[in-house]
Image (cartoon, grey):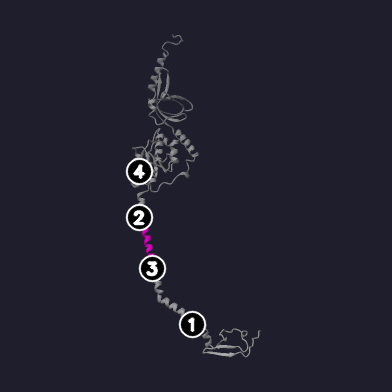
């Protein structure tokens, strides 16, 4: 009988060390060596290079740690209020009976990704950097474009192959950049350097590309500073990031968003086959137009020859001769000689001035009368005025 009044052997007896050791053995035997945990970070603290986290689901919480040796390998650095998906295992320290989740891998949940996406989008929208009015037209026949993507990569291989097949006349300048993890500063530096060299390199547009992956792999393209660099880039920017359903803030500030890296180069470069077909159509239209012009000019010449034959110089002379004959006849009809031939005479004073009225004549005045065949001098004996009615 123990001092607590319990029968000997009825329950096990432990020291603290023994109890903690038993718990550790129980956990190591009965719990999964690795598991996936969905949680929200309520507290994050960096100590001695290790990141200590408090994980919660709103009802319960548990401590976790990312050791410094592991933390440096992660592309994603979690902060408070981030939703995360963790691959971890349990760590139990017997000396303090302290239970924590050791993080083996961590990535943001889709809610965290969308929250950061919306935050940056709202900031750039407020600053007027996301607007349809800002989008510039892509060059129709670019002579040189810059490709910003990881090297080597399947995305780059597809871009180079497609560009060669589609429009080999365009020069491609490949600028290697990291496209995943905490690489925003490197991308910014590359964009700034390239922006200062656009004129010297003769670049007409740039393509920012990354192959497919999970949405969290594209988080660097939601970075505010990277997106601001893209928004103020001096030449058109084309993005081909991830899959067709993936949308980043970089896509919103770019001048043109393509569904994939391959689609980006297709959207930017003209089609060799379509250009060839267009040239053939232009040649045919030019040929048809030339035939039409020649036919029209030939018809004009035929019409002129016909009019010339109908209006030869002899015809013009005949017309002019008939007109002259008519005028001559008219002059002869209205001439004084014609009047004299009809029995009229012309009466004038001794100086030959025609007399139009009896009032212009005086008694005993000598008058000169012209007839068709001569003149008669006559002396005025009487003047009789015509009575007015």
Residue placed at 42% from the left, 76% from the top? 316
Q: Earlier in the sequence, mark 1 or mark 2?
A: 2
Q: Earlier in the sequence, mark 2 or mark 3?
A: 2
Within 10 Å of disc 1 (Cα), the crowding (few <14, some 14-19, many 20+) is few
In the rendered structure, find residue 280 and report the number of the disc placed on it.
Answer: 2
Task: Please say if the residues under marks 3 and 4 sit with CB atoms less than 8 Å apart.
Answer: no
Question: How far is the residue under mark 3 from the one under mark 4?
Answer: 55 Å
In the rendered structure, find residue 136 and report the number of the disc placed on it.
Answer: none
Task: Please say if the residues under marks 2 and 3 sit with CB atoms less than 8 Å apart.
Answer: no
Tell me the chief SS of the magenta region: helix
Question: How far is the residue under mark 4 from the one under mark 2?
Answer: 27 Å
Residue located beneath label 4 in the image: 172
Q: Which type of secondary structure does the marked residue at label 2 adopt?
A: helix
Asked if the magenta segment contains residue 286, the reply would be yes
In the rendered view, tell whether residue 244 sits above or below residue 106. below
Residue located beneath label 1 in the image: 329
Magenta residues (range): 277-302
Q: Which type of secondary structure does the marked residue at label 3 adopt?
A: helix
Q: Nearer the viewer, mark 4 or mark 2?
A: 4
In the rendered view, tell whether residue 74 sits above or below residue 337. above
Asked whether the viewer can see residue 286, the reply is yes
In the rendered structure, find residue 301 and report the number of the disc placed on it.
Answer: 3
Q: Earlier in the sequence, mark 4 or mark 2?
A: 4
In this view, the residue in front, 1 or 195, is: 195
């Amino acid at each position: 009988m123990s001092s607590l009044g319990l029968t000997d052997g009825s329950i096990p007896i432990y020291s603290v060390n023994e109890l903690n050791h038993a718990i550790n053995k129980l956990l190591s035997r009965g719990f999964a060596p690795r598991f996936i945990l969905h949680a929200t970070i309520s507290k994050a603290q960096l100590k001695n290079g290790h990141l200590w986290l408090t994980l919660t689901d709103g009802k319960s919480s548990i401590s976790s740690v990312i050791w410094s040796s592991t933390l440096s390998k992660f592309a994603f650095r979690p902060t408070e209020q981030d939703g995360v998906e963790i691959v971890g295992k349990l760590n139990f320290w017997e000396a303090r009976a302290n239970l924590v989740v050791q993080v083996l891998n961590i990535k943001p949940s889709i809610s965290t990704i969308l929250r950061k996406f919306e935050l940056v989008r709202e900031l750039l929208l407020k600053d007027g950097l996301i607007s349809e009015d800002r989008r510039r037209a892509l060059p129709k026949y670019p002579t040189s474009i810059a490709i910003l993507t990881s090297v080597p990569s399947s995305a780059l291989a597809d871009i180079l192959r497609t560009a060669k097949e589609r429009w080999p006349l365009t020069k491609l300048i490949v600028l290697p950049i990291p496209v995943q993890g905490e690489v925003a500063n490197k991308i910014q530096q590359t964009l700034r350097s390239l922006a200062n060299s656009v004129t010297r390199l003769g670049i007409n547009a740039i393509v920012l590309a990354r192959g497919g992956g999970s949405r969290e792999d594209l988080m660097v393209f939601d970075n505010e500073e990277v997106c601001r660099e893209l928004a103020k880039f001096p030449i058109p920017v084309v993005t081909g990031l991830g899959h067709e359903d993936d949308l980043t803030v970089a896509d919103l500030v770019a001048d043109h968003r393509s569904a994939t890296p391959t689609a980006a180069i297709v959207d930017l470069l003209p089609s060799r086959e379509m250009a060839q077909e267009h040239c053939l159509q232009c040649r045919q239209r030019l040929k048809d137009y030339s035939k039409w012009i020649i036919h029209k000019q030939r018809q004009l010449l035929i019409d002129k020859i016909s009019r010339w034959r109908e209006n030869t110089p002899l015809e013009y002379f005949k017309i002019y001769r008939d007109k002259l004959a008519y005028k001559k006849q008219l002059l002869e009809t209205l001439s004084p000689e014609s009047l004299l031939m009809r029995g009229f005479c012309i009466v004038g004073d001794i100086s030959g001035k025609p007399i139009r009225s009896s009032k212009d004549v005086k008694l005993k005045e000598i008058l000169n009368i012209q007839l068709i065949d001569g003149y008669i001098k006559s002396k005025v004996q009487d003047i009789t005025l015509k009575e007015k009615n």
